[in-house]
Amino acid sequence: MDKVLLVIGSLFALLAVALGAFGAHALRKKLSGDQLAVYQTGVQYQMYHALGILALGIYAAIFPGNTLLTISAVLMVLGVILFSGSLYALTLTGKRALGAITPIGGLSWIISWLLFILAVIVK
């Protein structure tokens, strides 16, 4: 699991940099300031949680087989997809209904971080 998390975390970080550059250059003239701010929020939180996934991968290498860590990792990855992904989709399509998905991703992250804390305390 540790290598998988390190690859996913690195991939999400790579995509955050690429999507951030895309937003700064290609979308600047196509989106309003508010839309661009929403898009950049997705990029920022994706990067934060890419680093979190990398931390989970490192911890998983040191303490393999921790169920709390596994669930935390799944929720953190899911959070990136739901939170950041919904913000990207919202800004690029203009479909405001997609914003209803965003809080589910945020809740996934909150639970993920809580489980990461518990995994560290229990081990």
Image (spheres, helix red, strand yellow):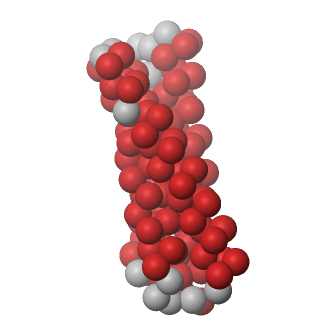
Can residue 86 be seen from the camera position used here?
A: yes
Q: Residue furthest right?
A: 121
Left or right placement of residue 30 versus residue 57 in this view: left
Q: Is residue 76 shown above or below 86? A: below
Image point 37% across, 33% down: which residue?
A: 101
Image point 39% across, 53% down: which residue?
A: 78
Q: Is residue 74 shown above or below 57? A: above
- Residue 95 placement: quadrant: top left
Q: Residue furthest top?
A: 32
- Residue 28 image point, x, y percent: 50, 19
- Residue 15 image point, x, y percent: 44, 50
Q: Is residue 53 shown above or below 39? A: below
Q: Viewer-proximal residue, 122 or 87?
A: 122
Q: Viewer-proximal residue, 17 or 120?
A: 120
- Residue 45 placement: quadrant: top right
Image point 54% across, 55% down: which residue?
A: 111
Q: Viewer-proximal residue, 21 or 69?
A: 69
Left or right placement of residue 112 versus residue 22 in this view: right
Quadrant of the drawing holding the N terminus: bottom left
Left or right placement of residue 47 versus residue 108 in this view: right
Q: Is residue 34 shown above or below 121? A: above
Badge count:
0
Image point 46% across, 88% down: which residue?
A: 65
- Residue 116 image point, x, y percent: 60, 68
Can residue 21 be seen from the camera position used here?
A: no
Quadrant of the drawing holding the C terminus: bottom right
